[in-house]
Image: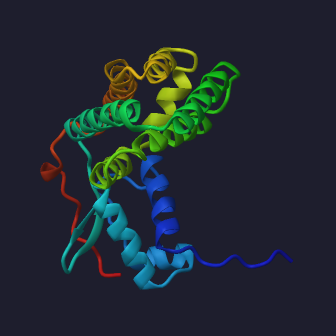
């Protein structure tokens, strides 16, 4: 008999619910009842509430006092703005790395970029490519101030949508990786302006893909305040 798995913690539960939201298993406006979550994932109410709070902090869920939580209907405008801010922050991270990274740190970062570019040419999965990309951006950001790193991590969580995976999958060998080559050249030369421009353009590409996919699927065309779920039934 297979060993029984331990129930997930709040972070793992939030990740599972996030994926259900991203895959449209749970629709915008749908209530996330604690009783259903507890039964489905084998967790207690305290874990369920913590997971919902994590999703609320990322803007995926709205929590209403004495009513419960429901999936937010994210608009095109909101996602556009989030990617715009993320592009600015990632550009800053690339520029700061050119100024502050040690020779060793920079050499290791360039090796990671080379690995990413080779993986993009060899048909690596979209999820693997975006994971490698985020590892590189985390290294670039690691030489920034603590405040800048917190802002980058916050905006990264809020824009961590499956649209990003689709964008990379459809663009393997194309625009994002051409921009990565610009980032690499800028880092190698310690040219902050060049590296920042390449980093911003990577996120602008992702922004365009997210907008296109949201519109094509009919998501986010109305302000979230205009999309209200039906009254929640008691859990």
When asked about the image quadrant of residue 91, the answer is top left
Left-right relation of 157 to 174: left
When asked about the image quadrant of residue 199, the answer is top left
- Residue 84 appears in the figure: yes
Quadrant of the rendering where the N terminus is positioned: bottom right
Left-right relation of 3 to 184: right
Q: Is residue 147 above or below residue 46?
A: above
Question: Residue 218: x and y, percent?
Answer: 31, 34
Question: Residue 217: x and y, percent?
Answer: 37, 33
Question: Residue 74: x and y, percent?
Answer: 26, 46
Q: How is the image coloured?
A: rainbow
Quadrant of the rendering where the C terminus is positioned: bottom left
Left-right relation of 24 to 77: right
Nearest the camera: 43 or 104? Answer: 104
Task: Give the residue drawn at x 34%, y 35%.
Answer: 96
Nearest the camera: 167 or 101? Answer: 101
Q: Find the residue positioned furthest to the front.
A: 103
- Residue 217 appears in the figure: no
Question: Residue 9: x and y, percent?
Answer: 52, 74
Q: Find the residue positioned furthest to the right.
A: 1
Q: How many marks?
A: 0
When asked about the image quadrant of residue 221, the answer is top left
């Amino acid at each position: 008999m297979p060993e029984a798995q331990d129930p997930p913690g709040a972070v793992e539960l939030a990740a599972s619910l996030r994926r259900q939201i991203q895959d449209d298993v749970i629709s915008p406006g749908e209530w996330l009842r604690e009783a259903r979550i507890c039964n489905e994932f084998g967790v207690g109410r305290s874990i369920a509430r913590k997971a919902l709070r994590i999703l609320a902090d990322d803007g995926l869920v709205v929590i209403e006092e004495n009513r419960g939580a429901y999936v937010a209907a994210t608009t095109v405008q909101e996602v556009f703005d989030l990617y715009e801010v993320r592009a600015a922050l990632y550009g800053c991270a690339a520029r700061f790395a050119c100024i502050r990274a040690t020779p060793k740190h920079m050499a290791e970062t360039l090796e990671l970029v080379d690995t990413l570019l080779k993986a993009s040419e060899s048909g690596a999965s979209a999820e693997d490519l975006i994971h490698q990309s985020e590892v590189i951006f985390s290294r670039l950001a690691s030489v920034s101030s603590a405040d800048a790193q917190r802002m980058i991590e916050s905006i990264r969580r809020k824009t961590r949508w499956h649209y990003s995976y689709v964008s990379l999958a459809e663009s393997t060998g194309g625009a994002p990786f051409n921009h990565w080559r610009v980032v690499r050249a800028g880092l190698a030369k310690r040219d902050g302006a060049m590296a920042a421009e390449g980093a911003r353009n990577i996120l602008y590409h992702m922004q365009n893909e997210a907008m296109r996919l949201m519109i094509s699927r009919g998501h986010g065309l109305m302000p979230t305040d205009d999309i209200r779920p039906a009254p929640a039934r008691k859990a």
